[in-house]
């Protein structure tokens, strides 16, 4: 496989004798002055109150390179969804990364569905990043005073906010970790954390990091977003969570996602494999835990507390704990903020699967009055009906009809993905299988009930 992603190297000429590099290769660099990857390592170190070790620095860079390569290399049509992604990556500890190579390949391939090749070369000595962190005693004392006991991803979505409430109610002290690429998302995350701080008096630690592409003068390093599926985005989030956990000596990482979107059994043939996102899929999380254990030479627990919850159950938790008014400030839309920014009074498109699941779940919990408005009223009747925007909802209703009417043995035959949640360990059976099916049947009833009712009006752009 020819190298088509050259990382961390301003010029790949010196490697052309050892590797076949495609003429159309994407070049990525996190160089603080010349690179096209904006990666604020210094900011993370300041927030953590410590320097990152070489493995963590490599993991930050690799996660950024995989994420941006995923955005920069387009997929083909239905039959050519999977891509050949061959990376050339300089690392500080090649032996360690070569030992973990197969696990890393499994992690990325499980998420993206692509054919992955990884080639590691020794990193050259690089200049310190601009604004390199200076750690002082008071900072370290302040950070340690928080006494965080785990790391929890905090996107600003309803699931991660409900997860935060759940963990805090359990008496845990999570370090909440957020990624942002835009100012509005950073403010939204901070606002929700402030709402948690007003309720829970013990220290709540929140670390935000920015990672995105950067405009550069060098035409070879000019990046264009050519792929919108963003299947590798979860690898970016989880990698930074591992880095933070390692820096703090923590062993627990939580990603809070409702069971329907975590298990993500495909609702149609067109969504099989990685055509449905696997951002919190149990198989992916198990591969990821094994990979970071190999890298850091110690065990980590990577779990989803909501694997057997519907989003409606999460919403009910927020209602019970009197956080209903916070729901409208969370964002679930797949297109936020790029698709929704032109709408002055909504953060939700209304027709992507996450929007539909959110709306159905809040309706089932009696919390529609606390919800955001939607740009498009999915399932609406009349002249405003848009066939393309209705496709997700139509597929979902058909899927839920099957779930609610088919006998269990026929259901499992039709959707073998229930059995293959942990494919590398053999079929899932017994109580765990029954609980997963139960989550989907509950959700199916919520969808079918919602499909028989109509409520919110479409939002018009400014």
Image: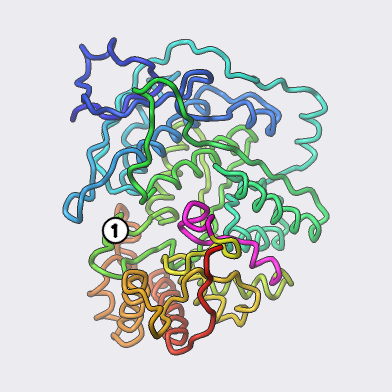
Q: Is residue 301 above or below residue 414?
A: above
Q: Residue at x 47, y 18 (%)?
A: 34
Q: Nearer the viewer, residue 28 or 320?
A: 28
Q: Is residue 64 above or below residue 340?
A: above
- Residue 86 occupies quadrant: top left
Image position, residue 344 (x, y; %): 59, 61
Image position, residue 406 (x, y; %): 29, 85
Q: What residue would you read off at disc 1? A: 426
Indicate the quadrant containing the N terminus: top left, top right, bottom left or bottom right: top left
Q: Is residue 344 above or below residue 299?
A: below
Image position, residue 142 (x, y; %): 80, 35
Left or right of 231: which side holds 14?
Answer: left
- Residue 250 occupies quadrant: top right
Image position, residue 15 (x, y; %): 27, 14
Q: Nearer the viewer, residue 147 or 431?
A: 147
Type of colouring:
rainbow
Left or right of 247: which side holds 413?
Answer: left
Q: Residue at x 39, y 48 (%)?
A: 230
**What secondary structure prevails in the magenta region?**
loop
Indicate the quadrant containing the C terminus: top left, top right, bottom left or bottom right: bottom right
Q: Is residue 338 magenta?
A: yes
Q: Nearer the viewer, residue 278 or 275?
A: 275
Q: Is residue 17 above or below residue 297?
A: above
SS category of the residue bearing label 1: loop
Left or right of 71: which side holds 139?
Answer: right
Residues in magenta, as a range = 324-342
Q: Residue at x 36, y 23 (%)?
A: 219
Q: Residue at x 35, y 25 (%)?
A: 27
Number of numbered discs present?
1
Q: Nearer the viewer, residue 57 or 374?
A: 374
């Amino acid at each position: 496989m020819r190298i088509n992603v050259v990382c961390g190297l301003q010029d790949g000429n010196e490697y052309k004798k050892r590797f076949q590099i495609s003429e159309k290769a994407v070049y990525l660099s996190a160089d603080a002055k010349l690179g096209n990857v904006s990666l604020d390592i210094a900011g993370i170190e300041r927030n953590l109150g410590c320097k990152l070790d070489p493995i963590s620095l490599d993991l930050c860079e690799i996660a950024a390179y995989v994420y941006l390569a995923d955005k920069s290399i387009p997929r083909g049509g239905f039959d050519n969804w999977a891509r050949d992604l061959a990376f050339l990556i300089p690392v500080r500890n090649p032996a360690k990364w070569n030992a973990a190579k197969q696990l890393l390949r499994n992690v990325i391939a499980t998420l993206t569905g692509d054919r992955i090749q990884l080639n590691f070369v020794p990193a050259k000595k690089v200049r310190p990043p601009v604004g390199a962190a200076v750690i002082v005693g008071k900072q370290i004392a302040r950070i340690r005073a928080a006494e965080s006991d785990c790391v929890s991803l905090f996107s600003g979505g309803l699931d991660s906010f409900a997860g935060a409430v759940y963990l805090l109610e359990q008496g845990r002290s999570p370090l909440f970790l957020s990624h942002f690429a835009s100012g509005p998302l950073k403010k939204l995350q901070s606002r929700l954390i402030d709402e948690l701080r007003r309720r829970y008096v013990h220290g709540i630690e929140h670390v935000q990091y920015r990672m995105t592409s950067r405009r550069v003068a060098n035409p070879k390093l000019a990046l264009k977003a050519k792929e919108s599926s963003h299947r590798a985005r979860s690898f970016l989030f989880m990698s930074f969570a591992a880095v933070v956990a390692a820096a703090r000596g923590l062993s627990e990482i939580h990603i809070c996602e409702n069971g329907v979107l975590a298990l993500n059994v495909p609702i149609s043939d067109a969504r099989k494999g990685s055509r449905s996102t696997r951002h919190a899929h149990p198989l992916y999380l198990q591969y990821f835990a094994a990979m970071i254990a190999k890298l850091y030479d110690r065990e980590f627990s990577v779990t989803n507390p909501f694997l057997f919850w519907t989003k409606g159950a999460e919403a009910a938790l927020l209602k019970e704990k009197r956080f209903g008014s916070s729901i409208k400030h969370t964002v679930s839309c797949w297109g936020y903020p790029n698709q929704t920014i032109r709408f002055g009074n909504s953060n939700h498109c209304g027709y992507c699967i996450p929007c539909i699941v959110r709306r159905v779940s809040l309706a089932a919990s009696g919390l529609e009055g606390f919800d955001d408005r939607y740009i498009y009223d999915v399932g609406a009747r009349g002249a405003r009906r848009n066939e393309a925007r209705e496709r997700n909802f139509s597929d979902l209703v058909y899927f839920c009809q099957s779930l609610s009417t088919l006998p269990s043995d026929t259901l499992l035959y039709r959707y073998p993905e229930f059995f293959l949640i942990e494919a590398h360990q053999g079929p899932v059976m017994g109580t765990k299988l029954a609980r997963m099916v139960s989550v989907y049947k509950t959700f199916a009833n919520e969808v079918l009930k919602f499909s028989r009712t109509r409520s919110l009006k479409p939002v018009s752009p400014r």
